[in-house]
């Protein structure tokens, strides 16, 4: 069998890209069916197929890298570019929602009572649970860095401890936010205040869940000896994503929670 | 612009095996002490900070007597342009009957 005369990874044919596209189509059209025709079945099929594609595609990447050794430094460099570009695109995604918030809050219309927060809205106290949530995410940034250094220093026990702590902090944040959502005296239907608040913090919360899941997968892989002190890009990507989630929260906290109250 | 180049080199350069001393605050201060410093920061700064904020929230919750604002049927709030795709279509996803009034007022 011939060896490749280059350091790139020519991936074997895979069904996941086209299945992923099909899953995305099922999900989007399913959402339309649910909203406008009151049937959730297409959406459920879409969400399940999306989850299955993600599980199997990423499982295959772990097989190609950890078990088959295809991730040369060149390949890793490409993955780094990819993750950086993806996170950049996510930053622009959130930028849009911050734009919407400032559009409505800097010049509140007469319909809102000419003030921000609008008449009739009692905003959450930024010095209460939101402050705790800030401390939690900042702490998780410290623990994930501890985990990273532990991995680089081949300290398995500490790496597992630190990464587990990071995941727990992530779950704690999500639990507190869910409680805040339930206890809030205003809802998403409360005009532009509710819309900007819940869409921005809601997408952030979704990213916290995604980031926590990514970190959890890394924890499981760490326990199963997938990472080496010099090669652990999956973990680095998860850590970058997690720091991004933390930074978005800091902006949310300073603008919507604090300035916006 | 130059900063962008430096940032991308920092993020991408770690693909190749590093030779000591590496970039980064930990290695500069003391060899191999990186993890220890972040562990110390975790247990001395980060987690106590979380604990203090937890205490703060707990104390705030204690002396809060659950004042519920009076219901005023403002037209710019509790908007119902389209029914929600769940339940009776009139309640938001995280509806809390005690603190969230419907367009017609509190349920209880």
Image (tube, coloured by chain):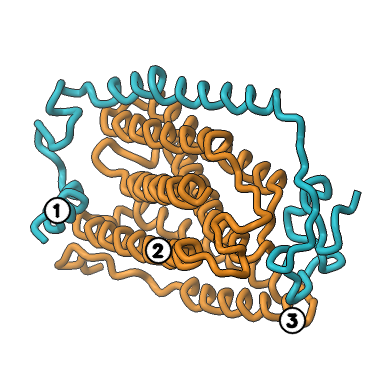
Q: Measured from the top left, where is residue A18 in percent x and y?
A: 49, 78
Check residue A36 in the rendering and tell me which mark sits there, or answer none: 3
Label for residue A76? Answer: none
Give the chain letter for orange: A
Q: What distance separates the C-alpha of mark 2 from that of mark 3?
A: 29 Å
Q: Colour of chain B?
A: cyan
Residue A230 seen anywhere in this rendered image of the structure: yes
Instruction: Count neighbours of disc 1 (C-alpha within 10 A) and say few if under 14, some if 14 to 19, many if 20 or more.
Output: few
Q: Quick check: A203 left or right of B102?
A: left
Discs 2, 3 touching: Cβ within 8 Å: no
Residue visible at 46% across and 43% down in the picture? A215
Q: Are marks 1 and 3 in contact (CB under 8 Å)?
A: no
The residue at the point 56 percent across, 63 percent down is: A114
Q: Residue at x 64, y 81 (%)?
A: A29
Q: Secondary structure at mark 1?
A: helix
Q: In front of the other: label 2 or label 3?
A: 2
Camera-side mark, 1 or 3 = 3
- Mark 2 or mark 3: name the one nearer the start of the chain: 3
Residue drawn at 30 percent across, 64 percent down: A85
Q: CA distance from mark 1 to mark 2?
A: 25 Å
């Amino acid at each position: 069998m011939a060896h490749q005369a280059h350091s790139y990874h020519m991936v074997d044919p895979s069904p996941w890209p086209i299945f992923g596209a099909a899953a995305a189509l099922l999900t989007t059209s399913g959402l339309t069916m649910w909203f406008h025709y009151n049937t959730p079945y297409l959406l459920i099929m879409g969400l399940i197929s999306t989850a299955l594609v993600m599980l199997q595609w990423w499982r295959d990447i772990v097989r190609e890298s950890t078990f088959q050794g295809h991730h040369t430094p060149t390949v890793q460099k490409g993955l780094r570019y990819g993750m950086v570009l993806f996170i950049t695109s996510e930053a622009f995604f959130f930028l849009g929602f911050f734009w919407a918030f400032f559009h409505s809050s800097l010049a509140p219309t007469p319909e809102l009572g000419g003030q921000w927060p609008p008449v009739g809205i009692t905003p959450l106290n930024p010095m209460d649970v939101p402050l705790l949530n800030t401390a939690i995410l900042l702490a998780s940034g410290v623990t994930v860095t501890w985990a990273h250094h532990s991995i680089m220093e081949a300290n398995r026990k500490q790496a597992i401890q630190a990464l587990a702590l990071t995941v727990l902090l992530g779950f704690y944040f999500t639990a507190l936010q869910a409680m805040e959502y339930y206890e809030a005296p205003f809802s998403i239907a409360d005009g532009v205040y509710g819309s900007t608040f819940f869409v921005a913090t809601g997408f952030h919360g979704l990213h916290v869940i995604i980031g926590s899941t990514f970190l959890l997968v890394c924890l499981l892989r760490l326990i199963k000896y997938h990472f080496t002190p010099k090669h652990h890009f999956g973990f680095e990507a998860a850590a970058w994503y997690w720091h991004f989630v933390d930074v978005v929260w800091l902006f949310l906290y300073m603008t919507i929670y604090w300035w916006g109250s | 612009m130059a900063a962008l180049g430096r940032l991308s080199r920092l993020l991408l350069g770690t693909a190749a095996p590093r030779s000591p001393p590496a970039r980064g605050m930990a290695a500069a201060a003391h060899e191999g002490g990186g993890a220890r410093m972040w562990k110390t920061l975790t247990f001395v700064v980060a987690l106590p900070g979380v604990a203090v904020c937890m205490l703060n929230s707990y104390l705030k919750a204690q002396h809060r007597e659950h004042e519920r604002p009076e219901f005023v049927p403002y037209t710019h709030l509790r908007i119902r342009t389209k029914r929600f795709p769940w339940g009776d279509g009139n309640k938001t996803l995280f509806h809390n009957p005690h603190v969230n009034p419907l367009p017609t007022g509190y349920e209880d």
